[in-house]
Image (cartoon, rainbow, N blue to C red):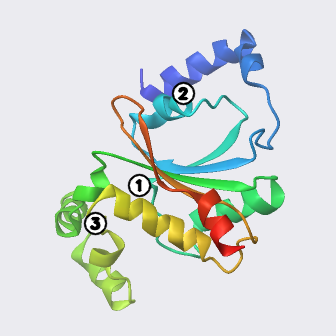
Amino acid sequence: MTQISDILNFNKNFVEKKEYEAYLTSRFPDKKMIIITCMDTRLVELLPKAMNFKNGDVKIIKNAGAIISQPFGSVMRSVMVALYELDADEVVVVGHHECGMASLNADKMINSIKERGVSEEVLSTLENSGIKLTKWLRGFDNVEEGVIQTVELIKHHPLLPPNIPVHGMIIDPATGALELVSDGYVENKATL
């Protein structure tokens, strides 16, 4: 038995027993909010519980470190889709303590890439094409700095609707305690 066959067997029973009915909702977030957070496994259930969200309340976008590094990349596109097509009107970036992106070592990761079978030729081709892997694979020095940089990128995006609050928080991955590091309501009032 593989993990995929376990998933498919579980899913068959899940559907047959109509267990999905407890999760039925629309594609529009009830609380009109977008959460950008880390893909850390400790946050899968903890973050929604700690923030009092249930299925259907928010759009959750997960990636490494809750970082948006490209203003016109897929994460920012997802933010724009949620704002313009799915009725969201608020953004919260939630980083966490003990984040792997804070200790990410690009050189070490490139060595792992090589060890897992990606050839020097492929890496050289990428570098010669202008893709600087050491820059692309960089993390951040501290979580607050990472959250604030992402908040600032979103706030200053040329396609962000005016007066959309963009907040920054840090969650403790053990307790769920939240710390507000950037209050989008206060910052919006200051610009009015």
Tell me, for residue 49, which label it has, or none.
Answer: 2
Tell me how far mark 3 sits from mark 1, CA to CA.
Answer: 21 Å
Q: Which of the two discs, 2 and 3, labels the residue nearer the N terminus?
A: 2
Question: Between tags 2 and 1, which lies in front?
Answer: 2
Residue at (54%, 27%) from the top-left corner? 49
Task: Locate residue 45 relative to residue 24 in the image: left or right.
Answer: left
Give how far across and how far down residue 34 sits, in percent.
Answer: 65, 50
Question: Which quadrant of the structure image shows residue 41?
Answer: top left
- Hey, what amino acid is under mark 3? Val
Give how far across and how far down residue 76 sits, in percent.
Answer: 61, 66
Disc 1 marks which residue?
Answer: 64
Task: Examine the rendered structure and indicate whether residue 87 appears above or below residue 127.
Answer: above
Tell me how far mark 2 sits from mark 3, CA to CA.
Answer: 40 Å
Tell me how far mark 2 sits from mark 1, CA to CA.
Answer: 20 Å
Task: Examine the rendered structure and indicate whether residue 110 appears above or below residue 43.
Answer: below
- Hey, what amino acid is under mark 2? Lys
- The quadrant in which the C terminus is found is bottom right
Q: Secondary structure at mark 3?
A: loop
Residue at (36%, 58%) from the top-left corner? 144
- In-front residue for pair 126/79: 79
- Hey, what amino acid is under mark 1? Ala
Residue 62 seen in the figure: no
Q: Which of the two discs, 3 and 1, labels the residue nearer the N terminus?
A: 1
- The quadrant in which the N terminus is found is top left
Q: Secondary structure at mark 1?
A: helix
Question: Between tags 2 and 3, which lies in front?
Answer: 2
Residue 81 seen in the figure: yes
Tell me, for residue 118, which label it has, or none.
Answer: 3
Residue at (44%, 36%) from the top-left corner? 43
Residue at (62%, 21%) from the top-left corner? 11
Asked whether disc 2 touches disc 1, contact meaning CB atoms under 8 Å apart, the reply is no
Q: Which of the two discs, 2 and 1, labels the residue nearer the N terminus?
A: 2
